[in-house]
Image (spheres, grey):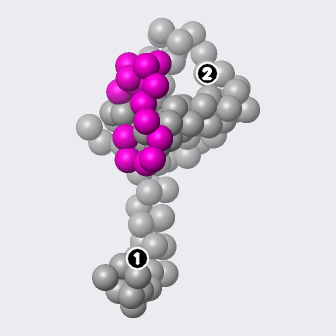
Amino acid sequence: MEIKEAQEKVDEWIKTVGVRYFNELTNMALLTEEVGELARIIARKYGEQSFKESDKKFDMADEMADVLFVLICLANQTGVDLTAAFERNLEKKSRRDSSRHLDNPKLF
């Protein structure tokens, strides 16, 4: 699925199932919450923390999808074309970091 199509699908879902978008501040809080849930799973799976019984039901892929969904909601309601924004961002990183990582001895 293309990013543009994902933005369209989320918009259609919001308008039919979700009734309307939550306001931007609410969605920002929801995005933070979803990132926190993802961070909790990663901290337990790859970090030093162990899983608690209540953590075992979480699905990392589903949590990533939750983050993406809310991010797309914010993009839609603020008029951001994520495809164009991502392309510009990748170009910026490519220019800025063209040799930065290759010259970083910590990465080798």
Q: Is residue 64 magenta?
A: no
* The residue stretch that appears in magenta: 45-59
Which residue position holds label 1?
94
- Residue shown at 41% from the left, 61% from the top: 87
How crowded pointer 1 is (Cα within 10 Å; few <14, some 14-19, many 20+) is rated as few
Depth order, front residue of 47/81? 47
- Residue shown at 47% from the left, 41% from the top: 49
Specify whether residue 98 is in view: no
- Identity of the amino acid at label 1? Ser
Residue 66 against residue 91 in the figure, above or below = above
Real-space CA distance between mark 2 and mark 1, rounded to the nearest whole angstrom = 34 Å
* 52 horizontally vs 107: left or right: right
Picture disc at residue 74: none
Tell me which secondary structure the magenta stretch mostly adopts.
Answer: loop
Depth order, front residue of 42/16? 42
User: At numbered mark 2, what does the secondary structure look like: helix, strand or loop?
Assistant: loop
Mark toward the start of the polypeptide (2 vs 1):
2
- Residue shown at 40% from the left, 76% from the top: 94
Image spot of residue 107 (x, y percent): 36, 79
On the rendered image, what quadrant is the C terminus found in?
bottom left
Which residue position holds label 2?
21
- Identity of the amino acid at label 2? Tyr
